[in-house]
Image: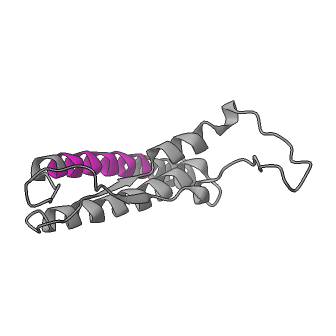
Amino acid sequence: MLGDYTWSLIDKESECLAQRFKAVSKNLANANTPGYARHNVSFEDQLREVMEQDKKLHMTVTDKAHIPSHPLKFDDVHAADMKIMDEQYRLDLNNVDPEREMAVLAETRMMYTGFMRVASSKLTMLKSVIAGR
């Protein structure tokens, strides 16, 4: 299963979603902390770039000063945990909106569940192939 595109995608997606779960739980835990700035985890743009790289033309590097344009891999994707400082939700400078965080939590849970269903169906297919059905 090493080198399998679907498994690599599921592995990276679940790793990044776990970081988002941690950020949302940290935000909810600090919802009443004065001056706390919420955290936002972003990785979807990087994953989309890796998945759509076949549509791009990769340039050849002929000099050390050239910017490399190599094909990206799933290992190049890293979830970016950003502290959002420029939003204000309350007068005590805490910008955590519990309703928004619960919506992000629900969205993250649905994404995680969807990817785990894909992994489960892939495992079911592999089991049937091994069993010879």
Q: Which residues are magenta?
A: 101-119
- Check the picture and name the quadrant holding the N terminus: bottom right
Q: Residue at x 25, y 45 (%)?
A: 107
As drawn, the residue found furthest toward the right would be: 62
Q: Position of residue 103 (x, y in %)?
A: 18, 45
Q: Residue at x 14, y 68 (%)?
A: 29
Q: Residue at x 64, y 53 (%)?
A: 73
Q: Residue at x 65, y 38 (%)?
A: 53
As drawn, the residue found furthest toward the top would be: 55
Residue 56 relative to residue 1: left or right: right
The chief SS type of the magenta part is: helix
Q: Does any portion of residue 131 appear in the rendered image? A: no
Q: Position of residue 127 (x, y in %)?
A: 49, 54
State yes or no: residue 105 in magenta.
yes
Residue 99 relative to residue 109: left or right: left
Residue 49 relative to residue 113: left or right: right
Q: Quadrant of residue 27?
A: bottom left
Q: Quadrant of residue 59?
A: top right
Query: Which is nearer the eye, 131 or 44?
Result: 44
Q: Position of residue 15 (x, y in %)?
A: 43, 62
Query: Which is nearer the eye, 5 or 35?
Result: 35
